Image (tube, helix red, strand yellow):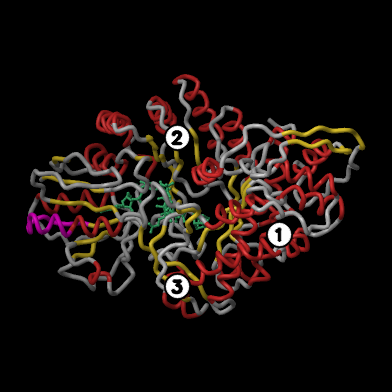
């Protein structure tokens, strides 16, 4: 039988060789106890998928939030071309708990609601032997109300390596991706499962479950093979990297392979929540080898106990995250705090509190805010949960930035028992404002001075900034966008600056950077104001200044102080000349910000002015 797998990737220019094909094929060739004859067609793994001219019996569509609409459309086309094609859907975006799933799935013959390797092998065997396809793990369109029984998980440590077994097929894909001028990303698993059950998450049928490990020796061999392809990104798909001590040893293998193959690979992982020594060690090894340009992203999601309880994150200790933080700061690794906006139980005050706590923890490089995306199989999408917390959503076309990324349709939480849609707008305004004013740098140094030197809380400082007339004016412009988005038909939160679509934080930055008086009404010392003006990437004509104090050394100390501690040093009186070079023109600056949503730490100011080049 002929099988075609479709698994379109998220970004048009960052492409992932087809790991799903490799997993299915390897299981059937090496691990399955029965013989199944399959002819695998070249899989569809680019961002844009086109059906091949030849015939096939089974079309596999692997569904994620970023591709499910495309996959449903592809299924329709395939059926139209050949009504006898059997269309089989799987992956985390199949809404298998939803009673109305078949309304969306008009052209689909079956879906899989669990881990796929064995289920697919059993399905193909049944197909080959002309037996009933109605096996555990599958729901057929012809038996839509079937009970979804639990299918035993695979013993991963006995499985053959998909990468090694399918080396030739995957290498051909790597070469093809490169020949198209696109980036090659690889995805690698060392285990499956996650002991936690955060309600916003759906880690591929794996949350709230025991962790199963792949064979260690096989993993070491895979590292060497994957690194020999010199991928741009080596993405570790585990939910909690660092949970095992051997994770650090695996990182050592990656670093060794980087030098062996002279590659410029970036390694990305989701850090273990309560196992910080291994996380820090991994980050340090990667940073020293130039394999961690993304910094250390620490997922707090929120800092309020009631909110954390509602989203079942209260078992992940914030105190543990702070311990980790101290280590990371000591190692000089950029730290990025991650929050979710739209959690049930949130209020504007709690949201501001979370943001300002992160500033006290020294998250001066970046604070990332994800909107609460309601994934169909996440606990938060359960109707009982939604009812309990009075959750309301909007359905929009989303991507994190405009430009070269296509938009996909998904749901976001915008209201709950504790906040209205209007409150949601104000929470968003604060997020974007702090990202522009602090992370991107317009007021960063003025606020650091206020906090560490003058004992003025960050919140007090920024509540004052937000009242500055020009700031108010710009924020009113973004309020219009946010209101249209949450109350109206507007599909995304992008805004146009000089004819170019951009994100709201970039917009605020650009607008304020153009205003000569954005610092004017602040009651801060003259030298500090000058320092802030010179160090920011703005469009002021002033490119240098003579200061009476050694502010570069003082700020450098303040910015690297341990989380929650205050920098106690005095500021030395000393004639100090500061100067910025490499001036940006407006659109070059916007382009710089737009290009770097994941790497924007330390890009909002001139590191040279701080003596930190
Ligand atoms: C790699 C990855 C990415 C990559 C993209 C990869 C790509 N191809 O383009 C990157 C890093 C870019 C990414 C981004 C995002 N991701 Co992501 N990502 C993953 C990750 C870590 C691995 C996916 C994977 O390949 N797994 C390995 C394969 C083998 O497992 P699997 O996909 O589950 O497939 C198994 C079964 O589902 C089943 N199966 C799958 N298809 C089929 C088909 C058939 C017929 C059958 C029988 C079985 C079957 O069998 C497979 C083997 O057992 C998963 C987490 C995870 N560990 O799975 C999250 C995950 C897929 N991402 C997720 C999310 C939410 C995102 C973001 C939207 C997060 C955000 N809010 O920013 C962003 C997108 C941001 C944006 N710009 O829009 C969710 C998806 C949920 C969903 N419903 O789609 C996941 C599950 C994690 C999570 N809970 O957050 N992601
Ligand atoms: S967010 Fe992370 S820790 Fe929480 S359930 Fe998902 S994978 Fe597990």
The answer to which of marks 1 and 3 sits earlier in the sequence is 1
Q: Quadrant of residue 174?
A: top left
Q: Secondary structure at mark 3?
A: strand
In this view of the protein, which residue sits in the foreground, 309 or 524? Answer: 524
Question: How far apart are the two marked residues, 1 and 3, measured between alpha carbons?
Answer: 27 Å
Where, quadrant-wise, is the C terminus in this rendering?
top right
Q: Secondary structure at mark 2?
A: helix
Q: Quadrant of residue 377?
A: bottom left
> Where does label 3 land, which residue?
393
- The residue shown at (19%, 65%) is 140
From the viewer's perspective, is the residue at label 1 or at label 2 nearer? 1
Q: Which residues are magenta?
A: 76-88
> Where does label 1 land, which residue?
356
Q: Residues within 10 Å of mark 2 (few under 14, many from 20)?
A: some
**Does 213 lie within the magenta span?**
no
Residue 136 relative to residue 469: left or right: left
Residue 217 position within the rendered picture, expressed as x and y whole percent measured from the top left? 43, 31
Residue 26 relative to residue 218: left or right: left
Residue 290 position within the rendered picture, expressed as x and y whole percent measured from the top left? 56, 29
> Where does label 2 land, which residue?
216
Q: Secondary structure at mark 1?
A: helix
289 versus 434 height, above or below: above
């Amino acid at each position: 039988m002929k099988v075609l797998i479709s698994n379109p990737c998220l970004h048009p220019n960052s492409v992932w060789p087809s790991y799903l094909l490799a997993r299915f094929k390897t299981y059937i060739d090496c691990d399955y106890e029965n013989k199944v004859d399959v002819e695998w067609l070249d899989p569809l793994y680019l961002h844009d998928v086109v059906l091949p001219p030849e015939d096939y019996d089974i079309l596999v569509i692997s569904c994620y939030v970023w591709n499910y609409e495309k996959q449903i459309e592809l299924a329709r086309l395939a059926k139209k071309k050949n009504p006898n094609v059997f269309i089989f859907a799987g992956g985390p975006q199949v809404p298998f708990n939803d009673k109305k799933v078949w309304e969306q799935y008009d052209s689909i013959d079956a879906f899989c609601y669990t881990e796929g390797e064995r289920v697919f092998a059993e399905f193909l065997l049944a197909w080959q032997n002309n037996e009933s396809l109605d096996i555990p793990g599958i729901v057929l369109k012809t038996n839509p109300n079937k009970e979804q029984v639990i299918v035993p998980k695979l013993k991963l440590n006995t499985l053959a390596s998909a990468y090694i077994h399918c080396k030739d097929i995957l290498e051909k894909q790597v070469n093809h991706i490169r020949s198209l001028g696109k980036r090659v990303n690889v995805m690698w698993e060392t285990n499956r499962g996650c002991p936690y059950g955060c309600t916003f998450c759906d880690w591929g049928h794996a949350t709230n479950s025991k962790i199963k490990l792949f064979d260690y020796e096989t993993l070491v061999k895979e590292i060497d093979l994957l690194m020999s392809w010199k991928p741009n990104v080596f993405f570790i798909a585990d939910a909690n990297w660092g949970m095992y001590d051997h994770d650090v040893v695996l990182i050592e293998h990656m670093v060794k392979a980087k030098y062996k193959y002279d590659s410029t690979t970036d390694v990305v992982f989701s850090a273990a929540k309560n196992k910080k020594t291994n996380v820090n060690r991994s980050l340090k090894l990667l940073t020293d080898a130039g394999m961690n340009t993304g910094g250390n992203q620490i997922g707090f999601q929120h800092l309020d106990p009631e909110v954390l309880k509602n989203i079942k994150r209260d078992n992940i200790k914030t105190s543990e995250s702070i311990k980790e933080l101290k280590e990371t700061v000591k190692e000089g690794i950029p730290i990025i705090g991650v929050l979710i906006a739209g959690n049930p139980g949130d209020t504007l005050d709690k949201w501001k509190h979370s943001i300002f706590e992160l500033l006290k923890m020294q998250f001066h490089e970046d604070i990332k805010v994800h909107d609460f995306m309601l994934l169909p199989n996440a606990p938060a999408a359960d109707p009982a949960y939604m009812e309990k917390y009075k959750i309301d959503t909007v359905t929009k076309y989303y991507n994190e930035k405009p430009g070269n990324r296509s938009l996909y349709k998904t749901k976001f939480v915008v209201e709950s028992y504790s906040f209205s849609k209007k409150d949601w707008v104000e929470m968003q305004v604060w997020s974007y404002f702090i990202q522009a004013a602090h992370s991107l740098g317009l007021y960063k140094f003025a606020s650091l001075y206020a906090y560490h030197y003058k004992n003025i809380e960050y919140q007090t400082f920024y509540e004052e900034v937000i009242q500055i007339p020009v700031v108010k004016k710009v924020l009113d412009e973004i309020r219009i966008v946010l209101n249209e988005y949450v109350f109206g038909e507007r599909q995304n939160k992008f805004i146009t600056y000089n004819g170019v679509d951009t994100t709201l934080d970039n917009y605020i930055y650009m607008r304020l950077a153009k205003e000569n008086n954005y610092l004017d009404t602040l009651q801060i010392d003259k030298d500090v104001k000058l320092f802030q003006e010179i160090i920011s990437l703005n469009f002021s004509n002033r490119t240098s200044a003579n200061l009476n104090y050694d502010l570069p050394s003082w700020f450098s100390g303040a910015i690297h102080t341990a989380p929650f501690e205050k920098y106690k040093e005095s500021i030395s009186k000393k004639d100090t000349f500061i100067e910025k070079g490499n001036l940006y023109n407006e659109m070059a600056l916007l382009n710089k910000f737009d290009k770097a949503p994941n790497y924007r730490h330390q890009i909002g100011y001139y590191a040279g002015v701080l003596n930190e080049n």
